[in-house]
Amino acid sequence: MTLSSSIYYAGKPNPIQVSRQQEKSPKGLTIFAIIVCVILWASAFPAIRVALNGYTPTEVAFLRYIVASVVMTVYAIARRMPLPRVSDWSAIAVLQITFYFFCYLTHQLKISF
């Protein structure tokens, strides 16, 4: 007897619903990735504080940008991701300059513990 496939199903479990329930539960690798992401994000603030003792905010931002670019380039090559369309490059450049440099650099000097 089926009232609605999403509400009630009498009999054998619907394999589609079972697989959807399994997809909702987090996998071990996902939890590990979340933990690593939180640790790396949280460690950035003390690292910036220490780095600002010897470098200017622009140098720290440039180093972080280079490291992130290298990591993302290796990942993109490994996953064989296509390059963005040429028509999108100007928008990407404008967003990078306005968001990253103006917002990020101005707040580096205001980090306090």
Image (cartoon, grey):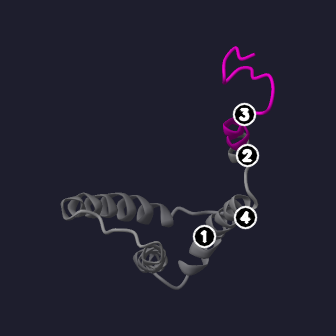
Q: Which mark is on residue 22?
A: 2
Distance of label 2 from label 3 (alpha carbons): 13 Å
In this picture, is 8 found above or below 105? Answer: above
Q: Amino acid at mark 2?
A: Gln
Near mark 2 (Cα within 10 A), the count class, few <14, some 14-19 or many ≥20, is few
Task: Work out which residue is located at the far bottom of the displayed protein and give it.
Answer: 54
- Horizontal and vertical percent for residue 92? 29, 61
Total marks drawn? 4
Q: Residue furthest right?
A: 11
In terms of sequence position, does the residue under pointer 2 or pointer 3 come before the other?
A: 3
Foreground residue, 11 or 102?
A: 11
Which is closer to the viewer, label 1 or label 4? Answer: 4
**Residue 44 bears which disc, if any?**
1
Give the Cα distance between marks 1 and 3. 46 Å
- Region in magenta: 1-20
Q: Which residue is mark 3?
A: 14
Q: Is label 2 or label 3 in front?
A: 3
Query: Along the polypeptide, which appears first: circle 2 or circle 4?
Result: 2
